[in-house]
Amino acid sequence: MDRSQRPRKSRRRTRRLLLAALALLVLAAAAWAIMWRPAIDPQKQVPAFDQATIERGRRVAAVGTCAACHTVDPSRPYAGGRALDTPFGTVYSTNITPDARTGIGSWSEAAFTRALREGVSRDGHLLYPAFPYDHYTRLAQDDIGAMYAWFMTRPALDAPARDNRMTFPFGFRPLVAFWNILYLKREPWRPDPQRSAEWNRGYYLSEALAHCTACHTPRTRLGGTDFSRHLDGGEAEGWYVPALNVHSPSPLPWTREHLAEYLRTGIAPDHAVAGGPMQATVENLRLADPRDVDAIATYIHGYLAQAPARATRASQPGSLPVPQEGDADLARMRAGHAVYVNACARCHEVGREASSGAALPLQKAVALYDPDPRSLVHIVRDGIAPPDGEPARWMPAFGAILDDGQTAALAAYLRRYGAGQPHWADIDNKVRKARQP
Amino acid sequence: MTTYHLRVNGREHAVDTDPDTPLLYVLRNDLGLNGAKFGCGLGQCGACTVTLAGGSVMSCLVPVSVVGARPVGTVEGLGSAQAPGTLQQAFIAEQAAQCGYCIAGMLMRAQNLLAANPKPTDAEIRKHMMPNLCRCGTHMRILRAVRRAADAMGGKGGKA
């Protein structure tokens, strides 16, 4: 090696190191600028509101289904504490009552608005997108103001936030800033001039306020809504959430009226009874302005109606058949059929409606047509209690009655001989997982 | 007709019956265990509640053919009129029974709670007992009785 080149080389290396350090510094400064958000000064006193605004806020919050996550104990509304399992850890909903210490009593309307539009807490920390600010960001300001009036006039409850349990590295909240760059589109809502006023109302309510797409649209690996697959079905709390577009699993076409009835009461004749996470949604929507719920039904039905008519067993009367002799999985099908006949048919068999409170004939049950058995298994395990105040009979829980094997056999049988659909892959595993407490 | 071997309150029984016969009918008609009651027959009232492998089930909904080797527990296993168990004593102390028709089911659902969760909160008791109905309206006394039993067991669970 030539000796004379050495100092030049080391000088070059020093320059490179300096440049790298500078680049790092610039990057760090940029990252800090992206991640850091200022605090908004606490307000000393909760402002006063007129009754009409508060009442409007009640209706807006009902469509926003705020209570579905922020109320755990009905005697302590909006005190938070509900665990939401996400692929990134468990997030607990927070207290949104006007308690100054543990709630949002010190939040001005500006701070409340920033939280809804940008996902930033009053003190400047970033909120996790389990809180659907990527939808609320498009809300009209007067709806935000009305909700603010509603929450600020609720009883203040002392309920400190529970610590989230996030997997590494998601416990570091500033990372959410990068999620926001990808998924928080801060555009105001724009009506579609080609559509009716009712459709546009439903569009606004469904996408911005009720955030239907948050569960009914699949998420990317990073947990963002995948808008290239709008309403294509997703998941929530271990349930499959049905697609509401051309891929709707529903074996019978929905009418707009049935959809509106379902959203108001949780019960749709010939289709389904709301279970799982949808039950909390219905319990909120039934307190909303019925015209708003109708508008949501109009908007969603526009997509649902795109699903082609399918030849299914759903329109065939009669009880479910015995397994065929040549069935490749005959032993399991027979075991499932036995559970169906001896346990389910008592209420669900066609012709028994009079004594059974019109339980759905199972060939019509949407859960049988889902791409996986999770929702069916949850319904069998936990049953379905009608929403508070609805006089319907309830489906009792069979979780302690049937074991994993019996549940899997039943699911396999119902899929094949109830829905007439191709078998669910990996059914034993999926059933076992869905049956875990 | 098939022969089913059932383990009820720790004793083995062989029963000849049809596969769709509800466990409730087997308990009452074949085994003479009349504690569990027939209320609605549709899993809506809870009068027939027994335990199956430790979980509460409405026995009118349980076809005998799904029971298999899993142990069944009925109110007769909690104690007798002469020697009532802790849970039964608590129900007597709170005078939780009016007509009494729902009480065997209430006891078995409560038993299942205390076995799994020996120190339940009042809210947990309410939530757990929710599926069982009492037409006389003694729910408040029933809740107090479960509370009393939990306290009497001192957090040691439901082995009455």
Image (tube, helix red, strand yellow):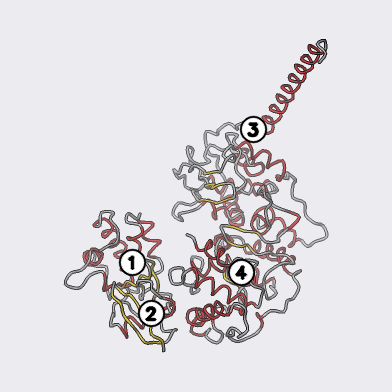
Residue A205 image offset from top left, x and y in percent: 68, 56
- Foreground: A109 or A412? A412
The residue labelled by disc 3 is A37
- Foreground: A125 or A1? A1
The residue labelled by disc 4 is A262
Q: Amino acid at mark 1?
A: His
The reply to whether the C-beta atoms of the residues labelled 1 and 3 are less than 8 Å apart is no
- Please give the label number shown on residue A324: none
Q: Chain of mark 3?
A: A
The residue labelled by disc 1 is B139
- Which image quarter is the N terminus of chain A in? top right
Identify the residue shown where x is 64% and y is 40%: A176
Residue A415 image offset from top left, x and y in percent: 61, 74
For this orientation, the residue located farthest to the bottom is: B1
Mark nearer the N terminus (4 vs 3): 3
CA neighbours of label 2 inside 10 A, class few (<14), some (14 to 19), many (20+): many
- Alpha carbon of mark 4 to alpha carbon of mark 3: how far? 42 Å
- Please give the label number shown on residue B23: 2
Mark nearer the N terminus (2 vs 1): 2
Tag 1's secondary structure? Answer: helix
The reply to whether the C-beta atoms of the residues labelled 2 and 4 are less than 8 Å apart is no
Tag 3's secondary structure? Answer: loop
